[in-house]
Amino acid sequence: MATRRLTMAQALIEFLTRQLVERDGVEARFFAGCFAIFGHGNVAGIGQALQQVDGLRTYQSRNEQAMVHAAAAYARMKDRLGAFACTTSIGPGATNMITAAAGATINRLPVLLLPGDIFGRRNVAPVLQQLESERSQDVSVNDCFRPVSRYWDRITRPDQIITALPEAMRVLTSPSETGAVTLCLPQDVQTEAYDYPEELFRRRVWRVPRPRPEPELVAAAAELVRASARPLIVAGGGVIYSGACAALDRLARATGIPVGETQAGKGSLPFDHPQSLGAIGATGTLAANRIAAAADLVIGIGTRYSDFTTASKTAFQNPAVRFININVADFDAHKHAAVPLVADARAALDELGAALAGFRVAGAHAQRVESLRREWDAELERVLAGAGTPRPAQAEVIAAVQAASGPRDVVVCAAGSLPGDLHKLWRSRDPKSYHLEYGYSCMGYEIAGGLGVAMADPSRAVTVMVGDASYLMMAQEIVTAVQEGVKMAVVVIDNHGYASIGSLSESIGSGGFACATRRRGADGQLSGEVVAIDFAANARSLGAHAVRADSRAELAAALAEARGRDGVSVVVVETDTSVRVGGYDSWWDVPVAEVSEMESVGAARSAWEAAARKERHHL
Ligand SMILES: Cc1ncc(C[n+]2csc(CCOP(=O)(O)OP(=O)(O)O)c2C)c(N)n1
Ligand SMILES: [Mg+2]
């Protein structure tokens, strides 16, 4: 048997350069590179291996969490057909990745995490940053990755990667199983040599399948659709990952079944498609939510049915509502006691479409869809126009960013009050143009995610929309973008604090307690002056071009200028929070204190109890 003597780290990195994916006959390299922050736990092992390898570029980052966000955003932009590896030191460098690992797994996005780990050889323990246990020597902080990883392994002998790496690849390239894959790499084992079989390094092509649904279940589903009076499609992220948007367009047009979109599924249809109802659920449009309330059949495609999509299980109020779920993951396909079409979205839509030949929704349903679409469009125009306040409302900033964006440009966001507003208000014209991380809604994803999106598709202009508090949590990847010559615009919405949670706090009777960025006041509360933060100066200090926009005209000019500039352009805009985008026949379950000393909380609790009565099980 031919062998090659390599360190474990060299063999691992060499293996990554030989992995390809193939879908629909198109082959591509799977790993675009490796994000790295070096410490004693990886510099001599993986670091040395990255330095000598051909064909896998090393990218720096400023924070391990951020690099995993960037990697996840990259994978999402590539429809999961491309990914990054991420290498860190042991201890805090490693655990910094856990938050973003959870985000990747929840959003079903492939990232390969290579945290350093404590020595396999134990004679020098406890090593720097080691968590000791009196009960076992086989415990390290990296065990915290287990629940957030779809595959987790610790490599305590160099030959173990021979069996671990193919498992890692199987999971990373599986549409139903993908997420964070973590290989914990003890610092000493990374540097140990072994005679690896030459065939470990052969070129491997991982085929991404398009599993077809069971024909009997397609027939059963078609029968349900034909018998339905008010069917509705819920399009989730799986529609986009599968490249099923054209198939969805055909089915929706042919049958007239309207389509509501989740955060991950937004852009499945262009906003002006005759069957598009726009956003659905807690942050949905009035058109989608009214159709959902009366639907007698819901066809979920590539959706996890998060509480935002189901309005905490209150969205579907028709007592007779049934579900058909098209999902590549068995787990999601079976939700809500659905007819489970466990299949690739595109394959299943084609087959269901064929089985529905000649079917058209009843005229009354089509008319309702049409009139609600018109009603929503008028409401949308009203909201986007703002209320003439001295400073623009957030909706007006969204309208300005939209006006400055081309159809293929990408808007990136994750947390705060922006996601709900964008979900309702953004008019998607391309399936990859709306990039909202709303599975984990992780503050700090925005700028790092924008970097990953821009790296994945430099042909599109990227605009990150980020709240002031999310910016403060994680803005440092501006430096990485500058380092890599990445072009990206960042719009910082300054409303002086955690405004979304401030509104939520008001709605649960707590009046916005400790949610604004204010100095401690005479009353002992955070009720004093606003803490003035110069976000533009901050961004400039990191290497960005940055301006403040103090009027609507300045905002439009700054956005136009950003479009024409290379590098990172930051636009800071202070908004008027008195004008908010409301909800439309929707709800989100945030339980309120059952007992309290505050009357306002008691009132909120009663309202919550009444609303929660609408929650259903869908058994
Ligand atoms: C890492 C993280 N911490 C906490 C939260 C909870 N949270 C959601 S939105 C929000 C406030 C975000 O503030 P900002 O980015 O300024 O947006 P705004 O709410 O003002 O629109 C918080 C704290 C979160 N989603 N992510
Ligand atoms: Mg804010």
Image (tube, rainbow, N blue to C red):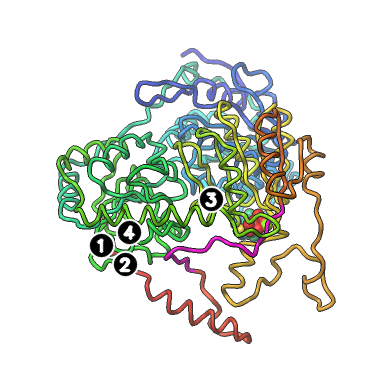
Q: CA distance from mark 1 to mark 3?
A: 29 Å
Say if the magenta span includes residue 583. Answer: yes
Q: CA distance from mark 4 to mark 1?
A: 12 Å
Amino acid type at image mark 1 = Val
Residue that protrudes farthest toward the front in the picture: 388
Q: CA distance from mark 3 to mark 4?
A: 20 Å
- Please tell me whether mark 4 or mark 2 is closer to you in this view: 4
Amino acid type at image mark 3 = Leu
Tell me the number on the disc at residue 422.
3
Q: In front: 603, or 407?
A: 407
Q: Mark 3 falls on what kind of element?
A: helix
* Residue displayed at 27% across by 41% down: 253
* Residue displayed at 56% across by 45% down: 101
**What secondary structure is the stretch in magenta mostly built from?**
loop
Few, some or many residues within 10 Å of mark 1 (<14, 14–19, 20+): some
- The answer to the question of whether label 2 and label 1 lie on touching residues, with beta carbons closer than 8 A, is yes
The mark that comes first in sequence, 4 or 2, is 4
- Residue 121 lies, in percent from the top left, at 66, 38
The mark that comes first in sequence, 1 or 3, is 1
Q: Is residue 521 above or below residue 335?
A: below
Q: CA distance from mark 4 to mark 2?
A: 10 Å
Query: Quadrant of the rendered structure where residue 517 is?
Result: bottom right
The mark that comes first in sequence, 4 or 1, is 4
- Residue 339 lies, in percent from the top left, at 23, 52
Q: Answer with the quadrant where ligand 2 appears in the image.
A: bottom right
Amino acid type at image mark 2 = Gln
Mark 1 lies on residue: 321
Mark 4 lies on residue: 291
Few, some or many residues within 10 Å of mark 4 (<14, 14–19, 20+): many
Which contiguous range is marked in magenta? 574-589
The mark that comes first in sequence, 3 or 4, is 4
Q: Mark 4 falls on what kind of element?
A: helix
